[in-house]
Amino acid sequence: MSLKLLKEGAVSFYAEPSKTEIGPAAKVSTVFYNPAMRHSRDVSVCLLASANPGKDARLLDGMAASGVRGMRLAKEARPEAAVEINDRSEQAYEAILRAIKRNKLPNAQARCEDVRALLHAERYDYVDIDPFGTPVPYIDPALRGTKSRGILAVTATDTAALCGTYPRTTERRYMARPLLSECAHELGLRILVGYIIRLAAMHDIAAEPLVCYSREHYFRTYFRVRNGARRADELLKSMGYANFEPEGKRWISAHHETKEWAGPLWTGEIFDAKLLKEMKGFASEKRLDIVKDLDIWIGEAGAPPLHYDVPTLAHIFRKSQPRQEKLLEGIRAMGYKAVRTHFDLQGIRTEAPVEDLRKLF
């Protein structure tokens, strides 16, 4: 097996790196590693170092490939926890064994099983599901395999479907209607979050969103999982539909009310501000390159759903596009909350009605 010795964070590992540093990577014939996903792994390290996964915690990197995420969790985030790094590929398993030995990680263990079978037999305080494509086949066993008060992390790279390019695929996989629009990535993320919450509720489990974000070619979501039908019922109250009208107006409702709509989807909070602030402290201390993203997410916490794309508004209003910061200042001066959004570099999240935005333009 001709693999390269690579380094990320505080660990070394063996893999065949993808040929691109940006975006999705094609599958490789040996042990997969996508350097473009380092940001995702940095977030995982920060979150696990900041959130409490439980006493004597067991952590599972369920679809590990090179094992770099699990090893970084074992060394950088939770050296006191027992970390199981699993991949059903025998080549990946052998590479993970070598890397664990090389990094001297007594708290890490390699496994070579189908993650669904593993989650049926074992339960963990943290479960990470990072598949190539849709996570749908793995979510139900992952929910069952996460202990109450544990953390579930899920990646989705089928963003084309979730964002509305293939609506029938979205309806089939996630039981929701997407909408190809300037809000497509936010809608896609909220459909994914809503699907996981609804699926958890079927088992009387509450999956409470902690940190859910969109980046480049993927969505990444973290949930605090708690047993209890009452908690699950409370979360279901924040499921709804996004409605859009041609002149830029948009709103959330219990049922779809316009020709252009998406849902059902999660309409509640996607960021836990307190946790994000703790993560920022850890990231700053360790000099991880995600502090700017954490600042944006902290600003977004508490902001209303359904962001606006400023160039699209300029087109609708037939006005020149104002500078983003000037627009934000104008909205705040009118008494509304207004922040930047990670969904769109030229986007804003605000409670201001579209009529007042038109006046500002």
Image (cartoon, rainbow, N blue to C red):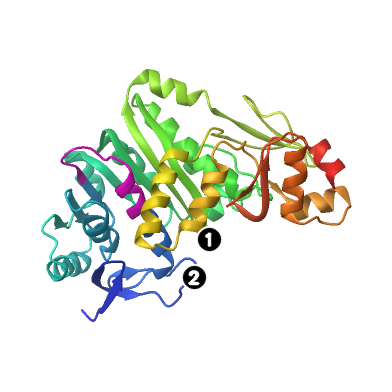
Instruction: Give 29 or 105, whichever is nearer the viewer.
Output: 105
Instruction: Give 166 or 216, whichever is nearer the viewer.
Output: 216
27 shown above or below 165:
below
Quick one: quadrant of the N terminus?
A: bottom left
The reply, left or right, for residue 75 in relation to residue 133 is left
Residue 272 magenta = no
Give the x, y percent position of residue 254: 62, 24
Give the x, y percent position of residue 22: 49, 70
Going by the numbered disc 1, the residue's amino acid type is Glu
The residue depicted at 28 percent of the width and 45 percent of the height is 127
The reply, left or right, for residue 167 in relation to residue 249 is left
Q: Is residue 218 shown to the viewer in this render? A: yes
The reply, left or right, for residue 178 in relation to residue 319 is left
Give the x, y percent position of residue 284: 40, 57
The residue depicted at 55 percent of the width and 51 percent of the height is 296
Structural crowding at the residue carrying mark 2, measured as other residues with C-alpha within 10 Å and reported as few (<14), some (14–19) or many (≥20): few
Q: Which residue is mark 2?
A: 22
> Quadrant of residue 70 in the image?
bottom left
Q: SS of the residue at dot 2?
A: loop
Instruction: Give 266 or 92, whichever is nearer the viewer.
Output: 266
The residue depicted at 19 percent of the width and 65 percent of the height is 96
Residue that sits furthest to the top in the current view:
230
Give the distance between the C-alpha atoms of the residues marked 1 and 2, in whole angstroms: 8 Å
Q: SS of the residue at dot 1?
A: loop
Going by the numbered disc 2, the residue's amino acid type is Ile
Q: Is residue 272 shown to the viewer in this render? A: no
- What segment carries the magenta color? 45-58
Q: Which residue is mark 1?
A: 216
Structural crowding at the residue carrying mark 1, measured as other residues with C-alpha within 10 Å and reported as few (<14), some (14–19) or many (≥20): some
